[in-house]
Amino acid sequence: MNILFLQKKTKLQKKGFTLIESLVAISILVLATLGPLSIASKGLSTSLFARDQVTSFYLAQEAIEYIRNSRDTFALASYSSGTTPGTNWLGTYFSTCSNPGGCRINALDSNPATAVIGCNSTCTNMTVDSQGRYTYGASALSQFNRTVQIVDVNADEKRVTVIMNWKTAGQSKTFQIQENIFNVY
């Protein structure tokens, strides 16, 4: 009878998994899924940074194009009136951008007198209007801060520096773009 009992006990032990076997299997499964999840998480944060970086590049270029357009408008107005553009080819309102705090440029404002506003110490963040355009004065505050500084190189050349600051996933990011703009005559 003892032999029969031992045989039945051995068969019962082989029927299921032990607790340790189950824990090992669960641990292997968790480790196998953590790798792809961490890669996906890193990919998502990288794509968010790339999106914000591209947006800030476009916003910086927008400010430079606004200044270039102001130069061209001044030159065309001078030539159409029969005069040669002088040394004030970017207009007096751009002297605002030469102070140490720089200025902000609202490219959606067609009036240069109100589009360029000096920053005392720091420019305020840009806002997003109802159409998703970056501007100043709209209700939705964005994470992007744009500061424009203009320095005289000589009478026919200005150095324009645009400094972009923003936060992505709690990390502060910054870059600057610089371009020299020349008189057109």
Image (cartoon, rainbow, N blue to C red):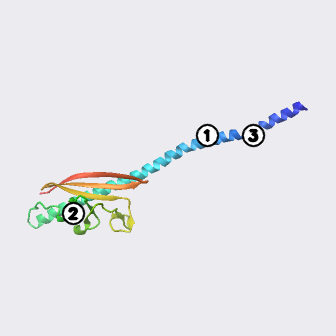
Q: Is residue 133 shown to the viewer in this render?
A: no
Q: Tell me the quadrant of the picture where the C terminus can be found.
A: bottom left
Return the x and y of residue 11 as percentages of the image width and height: 80, 35
Mark carried by residue 28: 1
Q: Position of residue 4 (x, y in %)?
A: 88, 32
- Can you give x and y, in whole percent of width and height, for residue 110 in the image? 25, 68
Query: Looking at the picture, how far across and down is residue 50, in whole percent?
Result: 39, 51
The residue most toward the left is: 83
Q: Residue type at mark 3: give it.
A: Gly
What amino acid is at disc 1? Ile
Which disc, if any, is residue 16?
Answer: 3
Q: Which mark is first along the chain, 1 or 3?
A: 3
Residue occupying the point 87% across, 34% down? 5
Helix, strand or loop at label 2? It is: helix
Decide which of 69, 45 is in the foreground and name it.
45
Secondary structure of residue under mark 1? helix
Kindly identify which residue carries mark 2.
96
Label 2 or label 1, whichever lies nearer to me, is 2
